[in-house]
Amino acid sequence: MIEAAIKANDTLYLSLGIYEVANARGVVQMIHGTRDYKGRYQEFISWLNANGFSVVIADLRGHGKSINSRYPLGYMENIQELIDDQVVITNYIKNRFPYLPIYMLGIGFGSVIARLYLEKHASEIKKLVLCSPIAFNDEVKMGLKVGKVLTKVNGKNKGSDTLNSYLNLDKDNYICTRQEIMNAFHNDTLCTFRYTNQALMTMLEAIAELHAKKSITTDPNFSILLVCGFKDPVEGGISGREDTVNSLKLWGLINIKTLVYPDMMYDILNEINREQVYFDIIKFLIS
């Protein structure tokens, strides 16, 4: 693994992990989720490498090592900056691997960023995997109203238990069934930090945008794989999955396949029987 830092469109440097293999069939651009960072997916990345895919994964701004004085751990300003960061990373991949197709994989909140990235940049990627995608829900609207008041009263840099509850960030009993994963999570300061009000508002605004009217033009062969655990509340159950699929179709994205894993929670890339998820994702990328 090569660790690199590339400059975003502002003064922030994004921390990248680059996992390169010889004679690769493509590059997977991974986007992690909330309370997360790039170092939590080594096993999955090893599987991708073993099957001929190079991988580039960055810490989101305000996460992992993608921090500075303006963007400390737990701070995000707005969703457009997060989308722009992924465009910067795509361009980096295109320069480093000029003849390889790019596949995108977004996890949790990373899947929200990936979906919004498609509006202007769908032509950059060959296929998309949405892993444990966050579903739109009506509580987001109330969360935004409450968040505007709390942010005005308490400031952007404070945290709010109320806002955390709108995003399921006030608990962690849905993350993973493997106790060793949860023990590592609880002992990792890069997972247990507290989000600021502005970061929470950024997430809520991004989720609300999933229901905005958009028209996305892609290659006719462009396809999306949605993978999630049946016990994951983040993806919203049957109605949440249906909403995610229908929202994508309204944007003009029709080639969508959904796989649900019965005994898994949110963190399916680190779950028990995760090898089946790895196999299904790799099969989709290769097909």
Image (cartoon, helix red, strand yellow):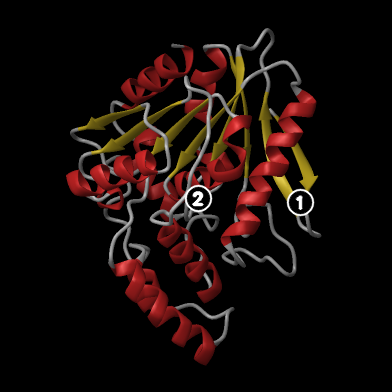
Up the image or down, 213 lies above or below 272; here it is below
Q: Which of marks 1 and 2 is nearer the N terminus?
A: 1
Callout 1 environment at 10 Å: few (<14), some (14 to 19), or many (20+)? some
Q: Which residue is drawn at 34% across and 36% down?
A: 268
Up the image or down, 160 lies above or below 23; here it is below
Farthest bottom residue?
153
Q: Where residue 57 appears, x then y in whole percent?
A: 61, 37
* Quadrant of the rendered image containing residue 226: top left
Q: Are marks 1 and 2 in contact (CB under 8 Å)?
A: no
Q: Is residue 43 visible?
A: yes
Farthest top residue?
23
Instruction: Say which element carries label 2.
Output: loop
203 sits to left or right of 72:
left
Numbered label attached to residue 8:
1
Q: Where residue 34 appears, x then y in whole percent?
A: 47, 54
Instruction: Say which element carries label 1.
Output: loop
* Quadrant of the rendered image containing residue 173: bottom left
Q: Which residue is drawn at 30% across and 42% down?
A: 246
Q: Residue at x 19, y 48 (%)?
A: 239
Q: Where residue 278 appears, x then y in whole percent?
A: 40, 22
